[in-house]
Amino acid sequence: MEFNPSNIEKKWKQKWVENKTYRVEIDTTKPKFYILDMFPYPSGAGLHVGHPLGYIASDIYARYKRLKGFNVLHPMGYDSFGLPAEQYAINTGIHPAVATEQNIARYREQLDNIGFSFDWSREVRTSDPKYYKWTQWIFMQIFNHYYDKAADKALPITDLIQKFETEGNKNIQAVSDENTPIISAADWNAMSERDKNIFLLKYRLTLPEETFVNWCPGLKAVLANEEIKDGVSERGGYPVEKKLMRQWSMRIIAYADRLIDGLDTIDWSDSLKEQQRNWMGRSRGASVKFPLENDPEIQIEVFTTRVDTLYGVTFMVLAPEHPLVKDLTTKKQKVEIETYINVTKSKSEIDRLSEVKKVSGAFTGSYCLHPMTGEKIPIYITDYVLAGYGTGAVMAVPSGDQRDWNFATHFGLPIVPISDAQRDLDKQADKTKEGHYINSEIINGLTYDAATEKIISVLEEKNLGKGKIQYRLRNAIFSRQRYWGEPVPVYWDNGVPHLIDEKDLPLALPAVDKYLPTDNGEPPLGRAANWKYKDKYDYELSTMPGWAGSSFYFYRYMDPQNDSEIVGKEAVDYWRGVDLYLGGTEHAVGHLLYSRFWNHFLFDLGLVPQREYAFKLLNQGMIQGRSLFLHTKSGRSFHVLIQLADDQDRLSFENFEKYIAQDNRFEGIDIENDIEWKTDAHGKKYTQLTAQVEKMSKSKFNVVNPDDVVAQYGADCFRLYEMFLGPVEQAKPWSTTGISGTQNFLRKLWSLFYDAGSGKYLITDTAPTPEELKVLHTGIKRITDDIERFSFNTCVSSFMVLVNGLKDLKCHKRAVLEPLVTMLAPFAPFTAEELWESLGHTTSVCDAQFPLFNEVYLKSDEVIYPISINGKRRGEVAFPTDTDTKHIEATVREMEVVKKWSETGIKKIIIVPGKMINVVV
RNA sequence: GCCCGGGUGGUGGAAUGGUAGACACGCAGGACUUAAAAUCCUGUGAGAAGUAACGCUCGUAUGGGUUCAAGUCCCAUCCCGGGUACCA
């Protein structure tokens, strides 16, 4: 029988569907394992060979775990709300749901071609109302809770109301708006319903806020910070500007500490954890108040991480937007300050970035007082101080901070050294924490830790400062002025937001005539006709951001049909959380942060059992495209569709004429003369292209569709090859150079079962020899170890070694081949099923048991301890000789192999060339 | 600038501190063939000689160090990739 992948694939794809092979249910007799892939956005372009990399890796692990006796949950679904479908709808008028449906069908077909073991009965789609009912439901819970700092968790807003009614808010430690006034119970009870609701917004975990948002006119959308790269939108590259808008926002800051500390409990890559830590940017320091010279009742509050440098302060700098600037500006300085503010305002985001090194600022004319010395300190404004971070004011220490140093040098302000370890202050700032303080009154002579402690305690005494923790993280903007997203389940009554009744969920997307904003600038939902809550109230018109639906989907997979709960208790108690999560690093500070945030919140509500939902995360690297360029002699270059070139990156004249010549990109180019044509050995004309690694994308003509690779080489070959390319985490360019290696491997494997010449079946029931068993068990050990440490590329190598070994031994024995096929099933499921059947099994190889290795077969006659000795010797020596003994004993002891020579039974030592000694027992 | 990774043959890449280069591609030679493809076998880090085999020297970006032993650990330098950016 010949090896024919496409027949095998067709047969088993059908059998898997018929037998519901990958259906999984709760089974308390087995340990569970939940392995999850980040679900894809179903784009119109379909899958390319880069997408399945992670899915193949997770599928291998899922199948492996199943063979190891685990009850494995391995689902797949679609993150089907998103901008491209909406952009397409704007252009074509086709409802995004329709286009999305088509894209999903295409994705599904492509995924099925690769032989994944997903349980499709659990599929979820974020744009399905049955699904987004729960996205909206979670939003409602977030609205109905506040963060209690004392309990360190979210509590119902009704608890808060109760406290307000009895004791006001003075004893409440909660995360709330800055400057929330203290009210008494009487104050509260005297409020109107509307005022109460407005007051409560200061506490709710989600609230509408007038905020400066990143408005992208090109996309007509508000973007999150992480959707902006280099001042332009990540998708599309449109300019972004600041705009004041009413936006729903979520108090993720309430969870900042838990999100930072939680990182220590999960097994994610260091770089990813570091990214999240940096993103949240927790800095410990102190806030210090500087009283104004003219009115000491008013103080400028600053945040500093180096309160120890307080005596080095020689001036104060405020952000141009700082609220006190207006009052501080003296008549004399008014023109200068106003000019400066106008200049800063007109600068675009990009200009500001490019002018980072330039020093600019203006003097307000006013002074504040040093909280320790009472000295007069001039107050400046400058654009290097950001209004949005800390208090928007900075105490400037030119001797310790380079930006302050630059500013001081530019404006001729004094630079006071504060430590005896500071060097070269005439050239630059020195931020050392070494040495002893000087010019610093109460902390003179002290070192860093003692000085910091002392200053804070004195400031606290004077009520002019205290230790403080500052975060870079801001509240997460939750509104998008778009159509294709979850409607926010809120209606407005007299300017106050109210939740719709839970009974009315899901709040479905209404039909609209166009997917564009209304004429008066409302989001597209403003176009919906007669769309009123209870026929009376206006609905919120913004929709939720992309990350909403993907922040809890892993729980819906556990119980996808449940219509009364987000996830049933039995299901969540059994599956608990994700044991292995696979996805790209690009979600480091987006999805992976927000989903942790929501998970912590759901945990507070007692709905989920774990603080962190994904214990182990594996990042797959991106597979890049290889772009090919055709260069003309006149110096122009063009992308050439990768499929048109041969494997030496040459483009034949034939292909050029057939597919490219009439391309309008080539208008006006002298094809015969401006392109360098060569002739190969067979007399065919060709031109040499050059290659470059780029992101795989349609516009770069470098997309490779997995369907094509599967059609040519077979799904198993494709799977093996993608794994063989290199470590899963590593980025690499796609190339089929070397795919023949995995193809050969599968053929060799097949030839252990069938004789290629005669087509005869070769399996025998003879008992294996010790040598054969040794080859097999060495293989089992290596393969098991490789899978356990997710080293799938070396694992494929291990399979190759094993099959080559068996081939050399001409081993066709059932007892050896059965375990081989079982082990191979995760990697090459189609071939494994077929061979498993040929071995006489009637059940799927998925129901088999992964073989265990037996160390007995691994032991050789000679035990070789790797030991090196001083100097270079060779040849054989007898049992330890005088001079070598010491070293040898020392090393052997160190390796905990044996304690004394007399106890080892070592007969002789062979000193082999170089640095090793073989010990013969 | 700062924070993470990383630098190994012609190529992709292997190596719990223990014979560096597994496995595969490519290449070269050979077998089969009228020929080619396919397949199979052999060789393949560099180097000098040598030729009966074995063996020898140098080699993991560069320079130091620790160790009986370093691609692996430590220090410094250079280069590449990713993240981030006036965060006080």
Image (cartoon, rainbow, N blue to C red):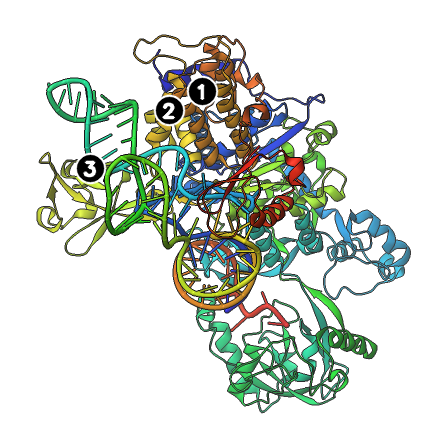
Q: Which residue is mark 1?
A: A830
Q: Please report whichever mark, 2 or 1, sits nearer to the chain's N-terminal start.
A: 2
- Considering every residue shown, the one lying at the far bottom of the view is A332
Mark 2 residue type: Gly
Q: Please report whichever mark, 3 or 1, sits nearer to the chain's N-terminal start.
A: 3
Q: Give the residue displayed 62% in from the left and 56% down from the top.
A: A277
For the question of whether residue A589 can be seen, the reply is no
Mark 1 residue type: Phe
Quadrant of image for the N terminus of chain A: top left
Left or right: B36, with A499 as reference point: left
Subunit of label 2? A
Subunit of label 1? A
Density class for disc 1 (Cα within 10 Å; few <14, some 14-19, many ≥20) is: many
Q: Which residue is mark 3?
A: A659
Q: Nearer the viewer, residue A905 or A621?
A: A905
Q: Give the residue displayed 53% in from the left and 28% down from the top.
A: A860
Subunit of label 3? A
- Marks 2/1: CA distance? 9 Å
Rendering coords of residue A125 (x, y %) = 55, 33
Rendering coords of residue A269 (x, y %) = 57, 48
